[in-house]
Amino acid sequence: MPCGVEGLTRAEVVQLRSAAATDPGLVLVALQNLGERDARRLYTNRLVDEVVRSASSGVRPGGDARGRRAVGVRT
């Protein structure tokens, strides 16, 4: 039985990507356990770049420092 990214079904990949959209920690764990190449294969370059950039700046992807999204708010 294949392990790593190759061992996942399409449905599992879709489910993991969906979960990572709300929990960027999944991408960070994948980077540690799978390495950058397979983490990018699993979660896409865009999502990995966003999570890495956010982790280094302390801001959650798609939100402010507290993880809130600014939706239609003008100041």
Image (tube, rainbow, N blue to C red):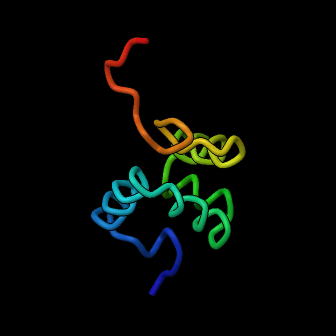
Q: Name the residue nearer the viewer: 61 or 7.
A: 61
At 64% from the left and 62% from the top, the residue drawn is: 31
Q: Is residue 66 left or right of residue 56?
A: left
Task: Return the residue found at the far left.
Answer: 11
- The number of numbered badges drawn on the structure is 0
The N terminus lies in which quarter of the figure? bottom left
Q: Is residue 46 above or below residue 74?
A: below
At 47% from the left and 44% from the top, the residue drawn is: 67
Residue 69 image position (x, y, % from top left) = 40, 34
Q: Quadrant of residue 34?
A: bottom right
Q: Name the residue nearer the viewer: 62 or 72.
A: 72
Q: Is residue 67 above or below residue 32?
A: above
Q: Quadrant of residue 29?
A: bottom right
At 31% from the left and 19% from the top, the residue drawn is: 72
The C terminus lies in which quarter of the figure? top left
Residue 18 image position (x, y, % from top left) = 34, 54
Q: Name the residue nearer the viewer: 1 or 42.
A: 42
Task: Return the residue found at the far bottom.
Answer: 1
Q: Is residue 58 above or below residue 9?
A: above
Q: Quadrant of residue 7?
A: bottom left
Q: Is residue 62 above or below residue 56?
A: above
Task: Return the residue found at the far right.
Answer: 56
Task: Return the residue found at the far top.
Answer: 75
Residue 20 image position (x, y, % from top left) = 43, 56
